[in-house]
Amino acid sequence: YGTLEKILVYQVPNDSFFAGLSGKQQILVLLTPWKTEGQDATKTLTFVQTTLAPIVTDIRNVKAVIGLVETRGKSGIIDRARESAFAGFDDSGVDFEDGEGE
């Protein structure tokens, strides 16, 4: 679990160093993971204990969108992804050529 801070669109340079990724567009995300002691919020009451160091990863590693609820001075995780929700990204109406949406 973590906070999605930013979505990054990256054009990999045309260079043999990058092999199969050469010249292709990659979508990466900047995430700030939460420390939860490995608990699964779909099965048990789970709270964010602290945040960890930010990481950058491929957007395909984002599996679900969840929620937080503040209660008794703690942030509880609401994860219903296994029941009916899924992560989806919609770029319709976004013109990346004019710099908007980056």
Image (cartoon, rainbow, N blue to C red):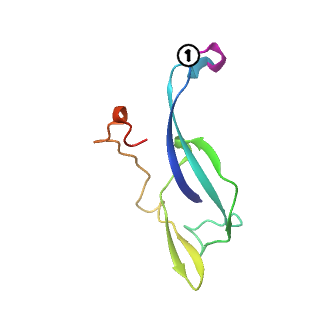
Q: Seen from this angle, which residue lies furthest bottom?
A: 72
The residue carrying mark 1 is: 14
Disc 1 crowd rating (10 Å Cα; few below 14, some 14-19, many 20+) is few
Q: Nearer the viewer, residue 96 or 91?
A: 96
Q: Is residue 27 above or below residue 11?
A: below
- Where disc 1 sits, the SS reads loop
Q: Quadrant of the N terminus?
A: bottom right
Residue 46 x %, y %: 61, 72
Quadrant location of the C terminus in the rendered image: top left
77 versus 88 height, above or below: below
Residue 38 is situated, as x and y percent measured from the top left of the image, at: 69, 63
Residue 32 horizontal side relative to residue 59, left or right:
right
**Residue at x-position 40% and y-position 49%:** 88
**Image x and y of residue 41, in percent:** 57, 68
- What's the magenta region? 14-18
Residue 49 within the magenta-colored segment of the rendering = no
Question: Does residue 67 appear to the left or right of 91 in the view shown?
Answer: right
